Image: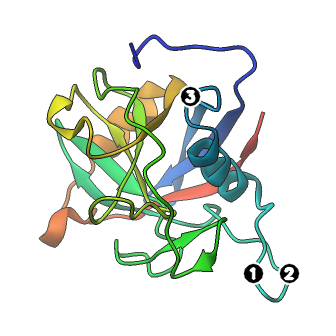
Amino acid sequence: MAGTHTNPKNPVVFFDISIGGQDVGRMKMELFADVVPKTAENFRQFCTGEFRNKDSMPVGYKGSSFHRVIKDFMIQGGDFVNSDGTGMCCIYGGFGQSFDDENFLMKHDAPGLLSMANSGTDSNGCQFFITCTKCEFLDAKHVVFGRVVDGLLIVRKIENVPTGVNNRPKIPVVVIQCGEM
């Protein structure tokens, strides 16, 4: 179901990606606001910079990196707090805060799905991953909230970046620009 879900009223956001300082293109992602509105809105605001810190500065994915890449599984990013997979922030409380799992209606049944990275039940923040294959063992553990509608080749390019310790890319994979279409 998730791999083919589409609703023209759902927001579409984008990431412009660079690998090793070279622009490799744009990923466009539909957010499933019709199924998981709270989760989709959290991601959308981090794409647009609408969420602001206490100094009214935009906070979000622009300039953040994909810090974990596992070929034939997933690519993980979104830690604009610590850049290493330990940072936490959500629009429903700010830095260091998380929000609950909204639902598990959508399944990890295709490549190119956006899902919340977490550290257990009800611990969603700013981190996410994009599936590179079916990951059904993640169903009912991670909230699927969107899908790549254009730019799956960019996902494949990231997936094939050489990695080192803790599956960290050896060359920077950066969201150089992001927003809403």
Mark nearer the viewer, 3 or 2: 3
Q: Amino acid at mark 2?
A: Ser
Location of mark 3 (residue): 35
Going 28% across and 21% down the picture, which residue do you hit?
109
Image-based side of 52 in relation to 43, left or right: right
Q: Position of residue 100 (x, y in %)?
A: 46, 57
**Vertical side of 26 occupied by 17: above or below:** below
| Relative side of 88 to 95, left or right | left
Q: Residue at (45%, 81%) from the top-left corner? A: 82
Q: Residues within 10 Å of mark 1 (few under 14, many from 20)?
A: few
Residue that mark 2 sits on: 56
Is residue 22 in view? yes
Q: Are marks 3 and 2 in contact (CB under 8 Å)?
A: no
Residue in the picture at 64% in, 26% down: 34
Name which quarter of the figure residue 140 lies in.
top left
Q: Is label 1 in contact with label 3 (beta carbons under 8 Å)?
A: no
Where is mark 1, residue-wise? Answer: 53
Helix, strand, or loop for circle 1?
A: loop
Task: Tell me the element at label 3.
Answer: loop
**Badge 1 amino acid:** Asn
